[in-house]
Each structure stands twice: as C-alpha cells, then as structure tokens.
Amino acid sequence: MVRKAPREDVNEDGLEVGPPKEWAAGIPGVTRSLLTSYAQMGAGRTFLTLARVNQKDGFDCPGCAWPEGGHRSPAEFCENGAKAVAEEATTRRVTRDFFAAHTIGDLARHTDYWLGQQGRLTEPMYKPEGADRYEPITWERAFGVVAEELRGLGGPDEAVFYTSGRTSNEAAFVYQLLVRRFGTNNLPDCSNMCHESSGSALTQTLGIGKGTVSLEDLHRADLVFVVGQNPGTNHPRMLSALERAKRNGARIVAVNPLPEAGLLRFKNPQRPSGLAGRGTTLADRFLQIRLNGDLALFKALSRLLLEAEDAAPGTVVDHAFVQEHTHGFEEWAADTRALDWAEVEEATGLDRGAVEETARDVLGAKSVIVCWAMGLTQHRNSVATIREVVNFLLLRGNVGRPGAGVCPVRGHSNVQGDRTMGIYEKPSAAFLDALHDEFGFEPPREHGLDTVEAIRALRSGEAKVFFAMGGNFVAATPDTEVTEAALRRARLTVQVSTKLNRSHAVCGERALILPTLGRTERDNDRFVTVEDSMGMVHASRGRLRPASPDLLPEVAIVCGLARELFEDDPHVPWKEFEADYDAIRERIARVVPGFGDFNTRVRAPGGFALPNAPRDERRFPTATGRATFTVNPLEVLRVPEGRLLLQTVRSHDQYNTTIYGMDDRYRGVSGGRRVVFVNPDDLAERGLADGETVDLVSEWPDGERRAERFRVIAYPTARGCCAAYFPETNVLVPLDSVAETSNTPTSKSVVVRLVRPD
C-alpha cells in the first residue's frame, strides 16, 4: 500500500470549522486581498501592482484566464488574483544562502505552502550528481549542462518538455520550436490534466477545441448552466459576468455536488450594493448532482425536449439548424428516446421532477450557454459527457448565435494560448507543415507523450531528461508517490520557475533551477501576449523592477539553451528572437492561423479576437463539415458497499497548486487543509462522527493508496460523495485511472474508504 502522511511543518491543531458561507466576496474579499498584498509587498508596491492588473496598458493577471471585456474597472482583479500577484511580487527572496542552509531532503519534508512563502528565486541553482543540495551556477554553465544531457541521449524522444499554462505566447512558440527542432513532440502540458477532455470532445463535435462564446454572449444569454465549477474561488471575476447576465434577465442553473457560496449569492465589491447590501442571488436553481451524473442529466434534458417537440411539433427542435448544420441526429435521437429514467435517477441522485423543472427553464429560453470546468473533465467518461452537452445545445440551435454556445472555463492564464502556439503532443499535420515552410527544417511527425504517458516513460527509464517550463509538476499530477519515484530516476530534471515548490525537492541525478521573470516585472520595456479563455489575444507588460538582476525572461532562457544546443543554427534566428519579440510575432503570424498582422493588431487597446468558425460563421470544421450529434451510452458509476466517490477540489486560499494560506473561508474551514467533506448521513452509516480523524484509502487493481490523518467535516455534499483538497489527495488518484480519449486523470471520481487510523 502507498501511504502519504503530512509533511514535517504541518500542524493543524488549530483547525477550526464553522458553517459554510451563503455568499461570496463583499467586504471580506476586499479586506483579505489587501491584507495579503500588504503582507507580501508592502503598501506602496501593493498600489503600484494592483492598479495595473488586467488593465489595457498593464499586465495580465498570473491567475485565471477569465476575459476582461472592453470596459474595465480601476480595480480589475479579484481576491485570488490579488493573492497571485502578491505571491509573485513579494519582497521575500530565496538566495544562495538559503540553499546552503537546506539540503534537498530538508526541502522535501516541507509543504508547498512553506516552500512558496520563502519568496522569489534569485539566481540559477544546480544540484550535481551525488550532491545533497543546490549550489549557484552561471547561466552559461546551466545551458551547457542541459545541452550536454540532451546531446547524450539515445534519441530526442528520451526527453520530456513540460509546460505550465502561464507561459506567454512568445515563450510558448519558441519553446515548442526548440523542442521540435531537437526532434520530438514530447510536449505534455497542464491541459492534459484539466481541459483536455473539453478539447477532445469539442474538436470531435464542433471542429474546434475551444469554447464558442464571448463575454458579451454571456451577458446576453437567457439561460446559463454552470456545471462542475466553483467560480467564487476559481474564477471570481466570472461572478460579475453572471451578475450582469442576471440584471439582463438571465436565469442561472448551478449543477454541482457541493453548494458553492459564489453561486448562491454574490456581493460585488465594486458596487455599493455589494458592499452594504445583500448582493445578488445568482443561481435560480441548484441541482445537487451525484459525482459523474452529468452525462445522465443532459441526456435526460434532451429526452424531455424531444418529448416536448413530439407534443407540439415544430416548436422545440430547431429543425432548420439541425438539417443544415448537423449530422447524426436520427441515431442520437433514437438512443436518447430509449433512456432509462431509473438509471438517470440513480446516476444523478436527482428526482425526475427536478430534471423536468429544469427542462421547462430550457423551453423558456431562446439562448442557452453551458459553462463547465474540471467537475466535468476529470472522469473516465468526461469526453462522452461533454459531447452530450453539445448534443443538448445543438438540438435547439444553441451554437453560433448571440447569447448561446459552449463555454469551457479554462483555469490558468494563457493555458489556451500555449496550445494555440503549438504546445501539444499531437500536433496537426497542417501546423507541422507550416513550421517546415517557415523555418526550413523537418519537424517530427510521430505523436509525443502526454503527461500520464510521460510519467510512465520516466518510471520505466525510457525518458531520461525532464524539462519543465513553469508549473509544479509533482504537485499537479496524479499518483504522487509514483510520479516522484519516476522523476527521481531521471538523469536530469530542470525547473524554470519564479518561486520554490515541491518539484524542486524531487530531483533527478542532476537538477537545475532556472529562475525567470514574472508577469509583474519589466522585461526591458518589451511586452508579451496571452490568450484568454474566450479567444481574445492581448498584450501584457510588467512594471516592477525584477526580483534579481540574475533573472532571465522565459524567451531568453529558451533561446539561450537553443543557441547552446544547436550552435550556429541555419534555420532559426534564436539570437534575434531573444532580443526582439516582434520578430517572434512576425513568425507566429505566418505559422498560426488567425494571427495575421499580429504586431499591429495586438497593439490596439484590448487586443483582438481570434477567429472561431462555429461562433463567427456557423461553420463547423469537422470531417463532414457539420456539427456532430454523438451517441454516448449512459453507464451508471456504481461503487462497492461502504465506499464513497471522492472529488479533489481547491480551497479558497489556493490557486491550482499554489497555496496562499490555510483557510477556506466559504466552506467554513480555517487553520488547516487535511479535511474531508462528507454528507452527515454517510457519516452516520459508517459510524463516524463529525470531527473524527480518518485515513482516506483508494482502491485500484494494482493496490491501495492511503492519505493519512484527515479530519472529517459533516457537510451538505451529495449523498455517496465526498471532497478533499489537492495536492494532498493526489496520491489517491491512480496513474492508470484516466478519461477515455483524453487520457486525463480521473481526479473527480476516486473510489475511497474512510478508515480510522491504525
């Protein structure tokens, strides 16, 4: 059995639990934003940075990818955005003296929270083979170490090049260019663990792996579904958009196993009524669905719509749209009509009446948008579930017209842009052809490794070098003990980072930490660009003095390594790219569709929208040229007696793997993170009391995995389901438990037992 106990610095004796909140933001959100910012940056630096976040002449928030829109508030950020900025713009520093005082073993015994609180990295650091700590190294020597290892491989596919979502478009483009110039498509990224299921399903059905709505569409919708998502914590500025939709007359349906404060009531801190009044009730209907029941819900809604069409022909189904723009309708309709209501109720945990009332909401709406996040994407049947969401929307023509469409809400800033720039292990032939035509070398054609496959390759020894452009790979990935053991087998691990994290303490035989500029910092008056969750591309320009004179921007790190690796490269002008980002953008304009005249268009205030065929033209670039209805069988996820379905979630004091503090204000938790939220009736059935300490044990054919010492919290989650924070519970997610087609880890449907500690 794999066991995962708390880190050395975890002390949750002061953990307190109160009732969950019934509203989000308001004065507490403002207060917490300022207190965190002052603690990390001081008053003057706080004002200088927060005044520039998400402004047209400022920098893009390093947190989420929610769009800004045309009109922007002077305070265009949320509480968690302020925390993200404070983490990066902190005045705390990690110097060579810190590394001299701490062995790698010391670092490994601490939590990510403790590591992150130490401050910004200041110079390149190197762990030689056999050493137990990092030591300073020059940039020139660091590039030499990487190039030496890469040249010594048996082939390019023995290297893995990972990317986090925060990398700019320019850095992402030169990074994938370096990797393909080297000769591999091993370009896993954080999308593999979050929205890969969305991209797979949308590409199959609509011909484009992105959403089809704009921010204005959200404001104009009649009905908005928010499914498997907690915007109050993960995308707080989305609450302002939902509030505006409500003022314009929209109804909102929240679908989630947990009641989330942000969808119950929102006190907009930028409006007087949000500070002093009750705020805005957002969700008109809350469907507390069982984990993994979403496919059944949308099949059931479509079945009810078909029945309504039968009762009043020509009034429900958009036959003109279906006939002109789709295919596969008849097969899908026949399957949907055969749906078993008993299975729907078992899968969803909802009674038929609640689903029928929701269907009436749909019938009363001309324009419908479905938004979702990782509550839909991290199950075995995630791709099928999202395809079923598309079926539901296609039935009434809710794609490609104002106020309607699909809205996968991406998490990390520019994770969508990185994919647009070619950070993908399965590049299209057209993209590779464009690279060949532009740069004159033959890029590799064989598909590379995704994240799960990369861990397997490192574990087996087939991959020997791991290079991470940002992120915290160890904390973000599943099966923590397996992942850590795999990385420790590597000959070289390289982390391009702004701050310390767990991945720096999990090293190969040799290891490098290459410190880089953050979004908030000046890059010799150059700017970079990012793409938001709705396909808008805009500039980002930092204003702060860099945390250290020894930091390099990501572009310079990539180009510096490329010049060392390829020496006098006849194909790619790496030195020019390093000095002039306009030169990179000129090449992007010739390689990536939609970026024509990039340098001119991105200098317009607010940037520009990328073309989106389903949204702009009602054109669907699938194999048939039409949107696709798909048949997705309903398979009820049944767990053995005495088990629960666990979903991993974020607390309000974290963003992805970055932990800002030890509180989860909206869920009533303070002073700790090792908690598991369980329905009171499920606790009673197991003879457990609120506040008891348990171990979480997951079950898989290759054995059990255990996360130790979690406090049980009686919480109004759906029956048969429970929730706990990641990365603490990533150890419970088996590496081989993945979504069909997308290969995304199934972090939202883990079968667990709650057991008293030995």
Image (spheres, rainbow, N blue to C red):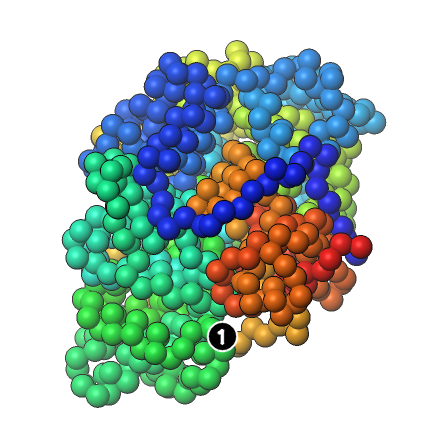
Q: Is residue 14 left or right of residue 297?
A: right
Q: Is residue 592 above or below residue 393?
A: above
Residue located 21% across and 48% down the image: 244
Closer-to-camera residue (361/405): 361
The answer to which image quadrant residue 325 occupies is bottom left
Closer-to-camera residue (325/443): 325
Q: Is residue 745 above or below residue 33?
A: below
Determine which residue is flagged by label 1: 347
Q: Is residue 176 left or right of residue 386?
A: right
Is residue 321 in view? no
Name the image quarter holding the N terminus: bottom right
Residue located 69% across and 54% down the image: 694
Residue 38 x, y percent position in the rendering: 43, 21
Residue located 62% across and 46% down the image: 674
Q: Is residue 418 above or below residue 229?
A: above
The local crowd at label 1, few if under 14, some if 14 to 19, many if 20 or more residues have their Cα within 10 Å, is many
Closer-to-camera residue (120/583): 120
Residue 262 x, y percent position in the rendering: 36, 49
Total marks in image: 1
Residue located 71% across and 50% down the image: 708
Residue 96 x, y percent position in the rendering: 67, 14
What kind of element bears circle 1? helix
Q: Is residue 32 left or right of residue 713?
A: left
Give the residue at the far top of this rendering: 549
